[in-house]
Amino acid sequence: MSPTQQQALARQYGIAIPQGSGEKLSTPGLAMPGQALTSANDHQILANISPTEVAVSDAEEEETPRRFGQNLFNSEVSTFAPTDNAPVPESYRLGVGDQLIVQIFGKENEQINLQIGRSGDVAFPRLGSITLAGLSFDDARELIKIRVSQQLIGVDAVVSMGSLRAINVFMAGEVSVPGMYSVSALTTVTQALFQAGGMTEIGSLRAVQVRRGGKIIAVFDVYDLLIKGDATNDVRLMSGDVLYVPTFIGEVQVLGAVKRPMIYELIGSETIGDIVSMAGSFSRAAYPAATLLTRTLGTQGLASAQTVDLSSEKGLSYPIKDGDILNIPEIGSLISNSVTLKGAVTREGDYGWTEGMRVSDLISDARRDLARDADLNLGMIIRQKNELLDIEVLSFNLASVIASPKSENDPTLAEFDEVMVFSLVTSDLIEAAEAEAEAEAEAEAEAEAEADPINLIIKKQLEALASTNVTTEAKTARLELLEPVISKLRSQARQNEPVQLVSISGAVRAPGTYPLIAELTVGTLITAAGGLTDSAFLSAAELRRLSERASGEVIANYEEINLTVGRDGDAVSLQSRDHLTVRDIPDWSPTDAIIIQGEVRFPGRYRIRKGETLTNVVDRAGGLTEEASPESALFTRTSLAKLEATRAAEFTREIQSSFATRLLTEESTSQSIADVTQIIASLEAIEGKGRLLIDLPAAMSGDTAANIQIVNGDVLTIPRLSNTVSVVGEVKRAGTHIFNEELSLSDYIDLSAGFTRRADDGEIYIVKANGSVTALNRDLWLFSTTNAILDPGDTIVVPINTQYKESLASWREITQIIYQSVVSIAAVAKL
């Protein structure tokens, strides 16, 4: 084969051959006439192509639709293996090259191998020449047995077939590798196609011709074998036969709900019913009455579509044409004669519907049919009210349904109704979640206090306090259950048919948008929203109602509603787009709390009221212990921590902006990009501590200015009394010393071995036990200790002198200055 033919052949098999390759594909070898077919003569397609050159993409083969039966003969793993020992039918016609085995027994026992020569006879010892060519195997066997019994007295013979002759057939047309093939005399059409590698992409599977002596003796349809199991025309080939595969006439693609969606070949007279039968008929999910037939209009270059009812004989008998696409849709998810149960029930799903069915037929036992958190005050029925599939929402009291089944309180259901049961949103759920958060906060606070009561506890406490803002799963579940209903009601609103929705906000457990059910009142809406919270102000809720004037202007009217028992709540009916705002009781803060820990008699978390002061909480905690150090009290506030983080972020942005501006204006800067990046990273890592300096001893002694008001989230930590003074910074021996009233600041520095050479002894400051900082008074050159009053728990900080230089470097600079001065003087003197 030429390189071009090799490339074309390889593409049919998904094989990549490098351009310019000098390798040639193997050609089928031909056996000599009369030579038996052996395994050495098996034809191997593309034998010279190495496995590494094969690059078949499975994903591409799956995406590309295949013609049904295309892979039968040319699949990668062939199921066909030529054999020379297959049973020989009695009708087999003997020919030149066939071998017979004759077993003689009786007076003599002997095996004689006879091969039919070119003259058509065999040479039988002691019997002479016997002409067998052209006879069937059965006739030849009987002839030999008769001759043996007549000419050899007392001897019987058993005749069997030996090696079969090879025949030469020519494979032509759209076969993968056309040419002459030497095959077994028992080879049929399908076996020959296997050896030739099958058809090409355009080869016909349904009109394979067997030509003998210039005439077509058989036409084989592969679909008859694959679909019906009919091998009638899979005839046995004879030497000199031509197996011809024409191009296919047409094909149609079948998509959708059939058992075998593929492309099917046409022979010119099929109907849609024939194609559906080829595809294995409809699947169980098929909806054949709305089948889409897409047909290409060749003259116009367009495609037209039409719906064909394949549930009728007329539709199935509709003729099909080349290029048609048949798409059988699936049935929808809607189940006739059904109702649906959703929400806080034990068995959600579809149920069979019958005329006169009621809610109690679905829910009759609260323990058996409902979830433990089911809301018995309100259920909803979503019903289709017209042919446009518009819906309306009805309500019912689930407790009344269970208590009085089949009564007027038990609504009758219609086909396709959806019954919704909601989950409770109770204060118990919220309080349980808050209690759990409080327990976690206290446990973390205790663990952190033991590790480091000053630095590590603040972050954990703030995170724990923030977690108490609980949103329960019941709220989310209620609104998610109603979301598709709300969307449908919005979409079906039309002119003169306002949207059937109302909304509620404020002190209810599940604020949001709700359907405008029949005879909906303010009280029913509150029930739908899970009921009022403990903070609800019942005397004055606000109802907003929109109205449209004749000019088209929309105005809002506001009305005060009294929600106390027996007042306006159950009497005021609602209209489309009404909004109810339930106010909170002023200054309502039932969950506000402060954490007090450390050296108090009863540390823990304390609920607080508005206006409560620092000393109030200390007194409620049992007062200070004998080992308490009120001067060292640590007080943190959540709002201050957030403010510190915000200020750090703002400072970070200022640094970024300033540095970027300097780079753009090419101003000189002593800082590199790496330095600025490091500074920015440090600022971004800052987490606000929220520390507020307080004077707890003054507050407890009656100083109203020091006795600050506490707010939700505050944390007060009172450490143990510390009888030490620490010295840190640029001293030779930093450490902590026992507090002694007679020792001064200089004495503690001397106890730390004095200053280092880098110390800035003019900027010493004291960090008091409560976190405040005291800077020392300074004279002209030295610091003064007039205000250096030390208390237990204080820390003396000796900062580093940023202007310090090593003496060697200083003398180097001085020498350089003197040298340059001398040189300058010498230069002037020479003038």
Image (cartoon, rainbow, N blue to C red):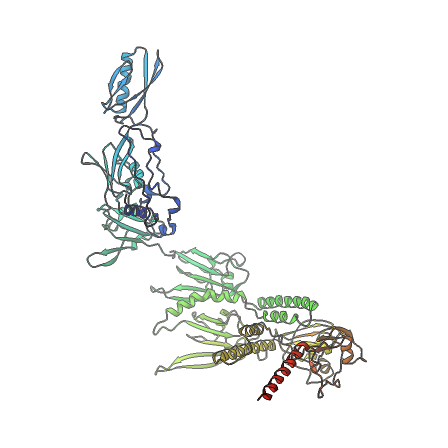
Which residue is outermost to the front? 830
Pick whichever, 246 or 41, lies toward us.
41
676 on left or right of 84: right
| Residue 357 visible in this rendered orientation of the protein | no
* Quarter of the rendering occupied by the N terminus: top left
User: On the image, which quarter does residue 386 sit in?
Assistant: bottom left
Expressed as whole percent of the image width and height from the top left, the position of residue 672 reads 54, 75
Which residue is outermost to the left? 214
Expressed as whole percent of the image width and height from the top left, the position of residue 58 reads 38, 49
Expressed as whole percent of the image width and height from the top left, the position of residue 455 reads 66, 72
Pick whichever, 747 or 376, lies toward us.
747
In this view, 123 is above or below 681: above
Total tally of numbered discs in the picture = 0
| Residue 125 visible in this rendered orientation of the protein | yes
In this view, 230 is above or below 441: above
Pick whichever, 460 or 402, lies toward us.
460
426 on left or right of 748: left
In this view, 590 is above or below 239: below
In this view, 379 is above or below 288: below
Q: Residue at x 50, y 58 (%)?
A: 364
Expressed as whole percent of the image width and height from the top left, the position of residue 130 reads 24, 18
Which residue is outermost to the right? 742
* Quarter of the rendering occupied by the C terminus: bottom right
User: On the image, which quarter does residue 802 sit in?
Assistant: bottom right
707 on left or right of 359: right
Q: Residue at x 23, y 47 (%)?
A: 249
441 on left or right of 268: right
